[in-house]
Amino acid sequence: MLTGEATASVATRVVEAGGAGLVLKSGRLGELEDAVRQVAAGEVVFARGLLGGVLDRLTGRVPTAGATLTPRERETLLLLAEGLSTAQVGERLGVAHNTARNHVQRVLEKTGARSKLEAVAIARREGLLD
């Protein structure tokens, strides 16, 4: 599967549907070509960093909320804890609104939160804001 959204939930759905690969649109053309060849040869290919989240979801393991946050996602979480909106997070990080929205969405997904407020509460409980 070729996607612009690289999250553990998307990757898990790909695996559950019988898919053997997931690569990002933002990757190099050569990476896509390599992935197609590898899958055709019977291998499994997933974008870097996704398999851990897939395994956690499929096995029912519950990692700590911050275990898989990237440095940028941690920074996003800290800004959310300051009470900033998604637009303000984008401004502070110097990124487009859609990029900020993607960062916030990944923070929500990785913390298991349904809202920004819940993500901040989880982060406080687990000491991620210290």
Image (cartoon, helix red, strand yellow):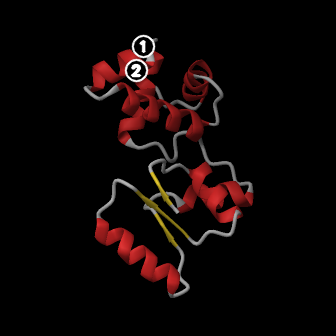
Secondary structure at numbered mark 2: helix
Q: Residue at x 58, y 72 (%)?
A: 20
Q: Quadrant of residue 82?
A: top left
- Residue at the spot of label 1: 84
Q: Residues within 10 Å of mark 2 (few under 14, many from 20)?
A: some
Compared across the picture, whether 37 is left or right of 20 comes to left
Secondary structure at numbered mark 1: loop
**Residue 15 location (% of width, % of height):** 65, 64
**Residue 17 location (% of width, % of height):** 70, 64
Type of amino acid under label 1? Leu
Q: Residue most toward the top?
A: 83
- Tell me whether circle 1 and circle 2 mark residues in contact (CB < 8 Å): yes
Foreground of the two, 87 or 113: 87
Q: Residue at x 68, y 48 (%)?
A: 62
Type of amino acid under label 2? Leu
**Residue 57 location (% of width, % of height):** 68, 54
Residue 111, relative to residue 120: is it above or below? below
Residue 72, relative to residue 90: is it above or below? below
Q: Residue at x 51, y 38 (%)?
A: 106
Q: Residue most toward the bottom?
A: 41
